[in-house]
Amino acid sequence: MPNLTYTRMVLDETLRLYPAAWMISRTAVEEDEIGGYRIPAGHTLFLSPYVTHRRTDLWPNPEGFNPGTFHPGEQQRRPRFAYFPFGGGPRLCIGNNFALMEAT
Ligand code: HEM
């Protein structure tokens, strides 16, 4: 399965355009500042893989289906969280590798 490079590229591109979890949320445990915005403690922040995966400043052809976007090595050219269909950090999807194996 690891040799099915193009299959994986198609799956990654599918999850870019149609991330099954299109919105996730976090609650700020303490006050913070993100990108110049003050975040009061206790406030809920929504992060959308769907929207981020279609940002024109991160993706050359956001609305198009182009598996080449995920050619090995391409990922390193983007910011780490330009693409997060499985979330990130301590609550990263624990089923991510299983899901990708099943999909393949
Ligand atoms: C394409 C398939 C899947 C996608 C897109 C997906 C996406 C996600 C995302 C975005 C999160 C993080 C939610 C958050 O940060 O609030 C998550 C968490 C989680 N996922 Fe998945 N998931 C997939 C398949 C699976 C499968 C197959 C399993 C189990 C066999 C699984 C088990 C979990 C669990 C247990 C968590 C919670 C982890 C935690 O909070 O510590 N997921 N998933």
Image (cartoon, grey):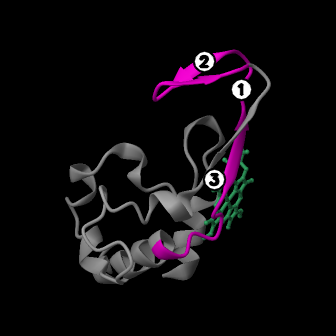
CA gap, disc 1 and disc 2: 8 Å
Residue 94 in the image, given as x and y percentages of width and height:
64, 52
Mark 1 or 3, nearer chain start:
1
Q: Residues within 10 Å of mark 3 (few under 14, many from 20)?
A: few
Q: Residue at x 42, y 71 (%)?
A: 12
Q: Amino acid at mark 2?
A: Asp
Q: Is mark 3 within 8 Å of ligand 1?
A: yes
Pick the front one: 20 or 62: 62
Q: Is mark 2 within 8 Å of ligand 1?
A: no
Residue 61 lies in the magenta stretch: no
Vertical placement of residue 14 versus 41, above or below: below
Residue labelled with disc 3: 93
Residue labelled with disc 2: 32
Mark 2 or 3, nearer chain start:
2
Q: Amino acid at mark 1?
A: Ala
44 to the left or right of 5: right
Q: Amino acid at mark 3?
A: Cys
Task: Give the magenta-colored segment's residue range.
Answer: 17-40
Q: Residues within 10 Å of mark 1 (few under 14, many from 20)?
A: some
Q: Which mark is residue 28?
A: 1
- Classify residue 32 by image quadrant: top right
Residue 69 in the image, given as x and y percentages of width and height:
27, 71
Disc 1 to disc 2: CB gap under 8 Å: yes
Residue 49 in the image, given as x and y percentages of width and height:
54, 58
62 to the left or right of 23: left
